[in-house]
Each structure stands twice: as structure tokens, then as C-alpha cells.
Image (cartoon, grey):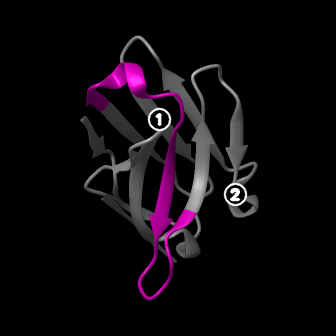
């Protein structure tokens, strides 16, 4: 079992910044990839960014150049620095850790609201 706990969401004006954190606990040795998805009201959950334990990163086109994902393997924590936020970034952000043979573990989600 893997537990993921997110923090750092909130309300910010357009152009502002927020930093999300996700701390993993439990069977963390089984984790390679960690990342962030988001889900806006009435929309499907979508990938935001992922990072593996070697530091390889992938971003959604919509956040490239504005968001930065990073990882502290010693703390079993992944971060998402979000700059130049736009109203369309408003969503519930979920931390995720897929585990081979098990599936995706998800955090509880943290709300990010960007006002115009």
C-alpha cells in the first residue's frame, strides 16, 4: 500500500504562483514514477506532469514553461511549482504514483482556484 498526501492548494489571482507538495508513505520502494493530474469541473482528469526516480520529466503542453515538477527522493516527496497561473488552471490537483502490477495510487486532491 502507498499513501499520498497533498498540500499547498488555494486561491490565487491570475499571474500568481502556488507550490503543491505530495508526500508518499507506505510501500515507497515500489514507486518509480510520481506525478500530478488535475480535474476541472465537468472535464476529464488530465495529466499535468510526471517525474521518475531518475529525474526524467514530462509535461502537458498547456503547462510547459509555467509549471515545474521536482522530486526529493530522500523525503519521498514530489512538488509542483506553478507560476503564471491562469483561470483555466483552476481544478482539483491529484498526486499519483503508479505501481506495476497494482495500478495507480491517488492522493485526496487539493483545490487550486485561479481568479481573473
Q: Give the range drawn in magenta.
A: 24-46
Q: Residue 91: x, y in percent?
A: 43, 70
Q: How many numbered discs, if any?
A: 2
Q: Residue at x 76, y 60 (%)?
A: 61
- Label 2 belongs to which residue? 60
In the rendered image, residue 24, in percent from the top left (x then y), is placed at 31, 31
Q: Where in the figure is residue 14, as x and y percent of width and height? A: 54, 67
Magenta segment includes 49: no
Q: Is the residue marked by circle 1 packed among few (<14), some (14-19), or many (20+) residues within 10 Å?
A: many
| Left or right of residue 90, residue 1 in this image | left
Residue 78 versus residue 105 in the image, above or below: above
Asked if residue 76 can be seen in this view, the reply is no
Residue 36 is inside the magenta segment: yes
Measuring 63% from the left and 56% from the top, which residue is drawn there?
84
Under circle 1, the secondary element is strand
The secondary element bearing badge 2 is classed as loop
In the image, residue 74 above or below residue 26: above
Image quarter of residue 47 = bottom right
| Mark sitting on residue 5 | none
Question: Which quarter shows the N terminus?
Answer: top left
Q: Of residues 109 and 33, which is closer to you in this image?
A: 33
Q: Which residue is drawn at 42% across and 47% down?
A: 96
Residue with the mark numbered 1: 79
Amino acid at each position: 500500500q502507498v499513501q499520498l498526501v497533498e498540500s499547498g492548494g488555494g486561491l490565487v489571482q491570475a499571474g500568481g504562483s502556488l507550490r503543491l507538495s505530495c508526500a508518499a508513505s507506505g510501500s515507497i520502494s515500489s514507486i518509480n514514477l510520481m506525478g500530478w493530474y488535475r480535474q476541472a469541473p465537468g472535464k476529464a482528469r488530465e495529466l499535468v506532469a510526471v517525474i521518475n526516480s531518475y529525474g526524467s520529466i514530462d509535461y502537458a503542453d498547456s503547462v510547459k514553461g509555467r509549471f515545474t515538477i521536482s522530486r526529493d527522493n530522500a523525503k519521498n516527496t514530489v512538488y509542483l511549482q506553478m507560476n503564471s497561473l491562469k483561470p483555466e488552471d483552476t481544478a482539483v490537483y491529484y498526486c499519483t504514483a503508479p505501481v506495476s502490477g497494482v495500478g495507480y495510487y491517488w492522493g485526496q486532491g487539493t483545490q487550486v482556484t485561479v481568479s481573473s
